[in-house]
Image (cartoon, rainbow, N blue to C red):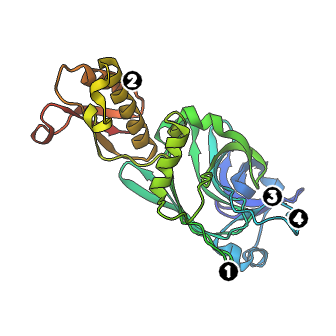
Amino acid sequence: MNIGDKVRLVHGKEEGVIYAFLPGNVVEVEIEDGFRIPVLRKEIVTISPVESQRMVKPEEAKTVAARADVIVPRNAPFAEKGIYLAFIPVNDRALTVHMINNTDWILPFTTAAALESVSTGLVAGVLQPRTTQKLTEVQMKDFESWPVFDIHVLYFREGNHQLPTALNKRIRCRAQSFYKNKGKVPVLAKDGFVYQLDEESLKRGAPGISDDMAGEIKASMLGQAAAQENSLPRPEQVVDLHIEKLVDNHKSLSNDAILKTQLDVFESNLESAIANGMDEITFIHGAGSGVLKNELHRRLGKNQHVQFFKDALKEKFGYGATLVKIK
């Protein structure tokens, strides 16, 4: 037996692939949905290549997808929404990452993991209705350095209909939101941490509304507190915090109100930059009395997602801007 061999349990119906050999004649087998179980070596048998080919349907050879026993009523309405990214614990150390299609759409898709300036392809294929696709595995101990998951989805169904616009999402997991997303994973019916990718309620194809505008409208409707979740609009690379750039009638504001407005814009743009996987962002705060600059630096020093910060290019901004490098 070798790592990667397909095997079947002698006294059970489970089948899987050998993932690792453990001490004590124990073999770790990865079964359906990416879960691993330890079994004694004498309790498994290898599946011959011929038998394995007979068991795998042609369409499954291209995209390995797990279909749950989901019974859909014959006259049920077409399910338009229900695309998820799910993290399912394998044990107390590892989680498998899955893409879930709980809709009636056929979904051509690509997925990648972006870390710093490098993007690594994970899985691409076609996700049939009510199926899932395992993308990768992550370790809890590396939570702070998990990549940004970059997901692109198209929609397809036979016949005449109006297609939704393509779905493009970048998911960066943060502790304050990750654990709030704990629940039952659709289709797989397992406990995990679930992010819905198509949760926007704006009508598709609405005239004059682009994906970016839709994100901004949604953030505006829900307020900045709700906008800190995972589908934040990507901010500009340089954000000017001068009050005249932020509000129209700033002359009627007190100094405290001005500072609060500037800090709110700073926090929301920094949070958006982190959520969108940006490597860096620059804030123009001006020289002035240094109150705003000092407060920005104090907050940046406490932010666990900030690698470092420094004065931006003096030739371009003078002494009135700070460059923030994001982990």
- Secondary structure of the residue carrying tag 4 is loop
* Percent position of residue 276, x then y: 44, 47
Callout in the foreground (3, 1): 1
Q: Amino acid at mark 4?
A: Pro
Residue 67 visible within the image: yes
Q: Amino acid at mark 1?
A: Asn
- Nearer the observer, 79 or 93: 79
**Quadrant holding the N terminus:** bottom right
Q: Amino acid at mark 3?
A: Ile
- Nearer the observer, 112 or 1: 112
Among the two numbered marks 1 and 2 on one chain, the one whose residue lies closer to the N terminus = 1
- The residue where tag 4 is placed is 73
- Whether residue 17 sits left or right of residue 114 in the image: it is right
Among the two numbered marks 4 and 3 on one chain, the one whose residue lies closer to the N terminus = 3
Q: Is residue 129 above or below residue 29?
A: below
Q: Amino acid at mark 2?
A: Lys
Among the two numbered marks 2 and 3 on one chain, the one whose residue lies closer to the N terminus = 3
- Secondary structure of the residue carrying tag 2 is helix
* Mark 4 to mark 3 CA distance (whole Å): 39 Å
Callout in the foreground (1, 2): 1
Among the two numbered marks 2 and 4 on one chain, the one whose residue lies closer to the N terminus = 4
Please report the residue visible at 68 percent of the width from the left and 38 percent of the height from the top.
Answer: 182
- The residue where tag 3 is placed is 44
State yes or no: discs 2 and 3 in contact (Cβ < 8 Å). no
* Mark 1 to mark 4 CA distance (whole Å): 22 Å
